[in-house]
Amino acid sequence: MGLPWPPTFSPISQARSPRMDSRSSGETVPLSSARLMVSSSSSTARLSWPASARQIARWVAARYCPAASARSNALVTCSTCPAKEACQATSTTTESLGAAHERTLSARFEVAVWTWRLDGPAAAARIFCELLEYAESLESVPWSFIIDCGWNLGGALTDAGNANAALPILEATIEESQRAYGPEHRHTLNVRLTHVQAVGSAGEPKKAAKLAARLVEDSGRVLGEAYLTTLQARYAVAGWTAESGNEETARQLFETLHAETARLFGDDHWLVVEVGTRLKQA
């Protein structure tokens, strides 16, 4: 039973103290694609051009760290990209900032994200794994970037059918997120949601259902009953309950969830559609 969404992933070797961005004394600067650090790539992606988005991200990585990009044949030219203007805007920056700079790391993260979309989770997992190993070797990388890489690596491995490899990564990422953000922060709760998926996919649906139910309680208390993480956790409870063999209970859970999500979001929302599809199959 898969969640209706990927996370929005070499195991983390050891516990690390939360690391702050070296440029600030108290604030972190997240570098994940979700925060749109590589603006031209992200803007292109929003125009439904994932291939072009990946090209821009590769191009940015090559611009800022040519040696690192050459290793993965990442350098592309503006002539191959439909979003040529975005590439040209980025080309105004000519200074080589190095492999450890936030823009280079962000660009590499973007490449991994859009590789997942284009080539599948296994290909993305290889990129996230390499990026995570490199990021862990740095002293000044924000802990938020480490957490995002671990989260996405675990998710990609799970989607690629390698949940057993994903489990230690996600467990370590949960611990890191708890230290960095706190145990009840929405980011920690979202990593736990991905961990539930890995547990169930690794062959433990009953355990996954219990973990999801606990997440529903925690997320509902902290974020609210109508928060998307809470509703997705309820979807996971229903799904893994079905996988555990309790079809009737699962059907009732899906029915209740479908009615509530339709009332909150409307019939066309992706979660409503997904729950409705599972309900028809129950």
Image (spheres, helix red, strand yellow):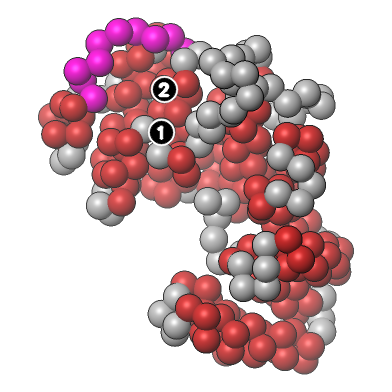
Asked if residue 91 can be seen in this view, the reply is yes
Which residue is more in the foreground, 193 or 28? 28
In the image, is residue 91 part of the stretch drawn in magenta? Answer: yes
Residue 103 tag number: 2
The stretch in magenta equals: 90-99
Mark 1 Cα shell of 10 Å, populated few (<14), some (14-19), many (≥20): many
| Magenta stretch secondary structure, dominant | loop
Residue 193, picture quadrant: bottom right
Q: Residue at the front extreme?
A: 26
Residue 157 lies in the magenta-colored region: no
Q: Along the line of sight, which residue is nearer the eye, 202 or 86?
A: 86
Q: Which amino acid does label 1 sit on?
A: Met
Assign a secondary structure to mark 1. Answer: loop
Q: Which residue is drawn at 33% across and 18% down?
A: 62
Q: Tell me which residue sits at (73%, 61%) in the image.
A: 222
Q: Where is residue 74 in the image (x, y as percent from the top left)?
A: 35, 23
